[in-house]
Image (tube, rainbow, N blue to C red):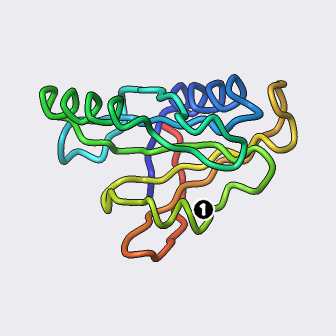
Amino acid sequence: MLRISQALIDQMVAHSRQDHPDEACGVIAGPAGSDLPNRFIPMINAARSPTFYEFDSADLLRLYRELDSNEEDPVVIYHSHTATEAYPSRTDVAYASEPFAHYVLISTRETGTQDGPYEIRSYRIVDGVISEEEIVVT
């Protein structure tokens, strides 16, 4: 189960709408070992693609150094789907390398950059196995 504030959900959705029609991506960090997401870190989709996201390798290195120095973990790894449901693709599963992270997907397929309905779902992805989990808004 993912426990997350409405404010952090709103930031992920806003980022997803801002980057539409390309996929948005980012991380929400939290204190190491806590499973408590509290620091929103939007990233740039180096692929600049509506069907694929990729963290820039230099940005990713900086992120992990920053997380280490702050004694934080990547609690949530999020990205958007712009034309499909909020369900991990084969590529998403192949790139899922953080076994303790919550993988959050936001679909902007219905409204794009506009306000309105969106779909948000959270998963654990471990060894290629996708397990959907409940999102509890705190």
Q: In which quarter of the image is residue 132?
A: bottom right
Tell me what residue is drawn at x 44 percent, y 66 percent. Answer: 125
Drawn side of residue 91 relative to residue 85, left or right: left
Q: In this view, does 46 lie above or below 90?
A: above
Query: Splitting the image into 4 quarters, where does residue 86 fall?
Result: bottom right
Residue 124 spot, x, y in % from top left: 44, 63
30 relative to 40, above or below: below
Residue type, label 1: Pro
Taking the image as shown, residue 66 lies to the left or right of residue 54, namely left
Q: Which residue does the numbered mark 1 point to in the structure image?
A: 88
Would residue 70 appear left or right of 39 to someone viewing this image? left
Seen in the picture, residue 134 relative to 79 is either above or below; the reply is below
Q: Residue at x 50, y 66 (%)?
A: 93
Rendered location of residue 51, percent (x, y): 70, 49
Q: Where is residue 66 in the image (x, y as percent from the top left)?
A: 21, 27
Which image quadrant: the N terminus?
bottom left
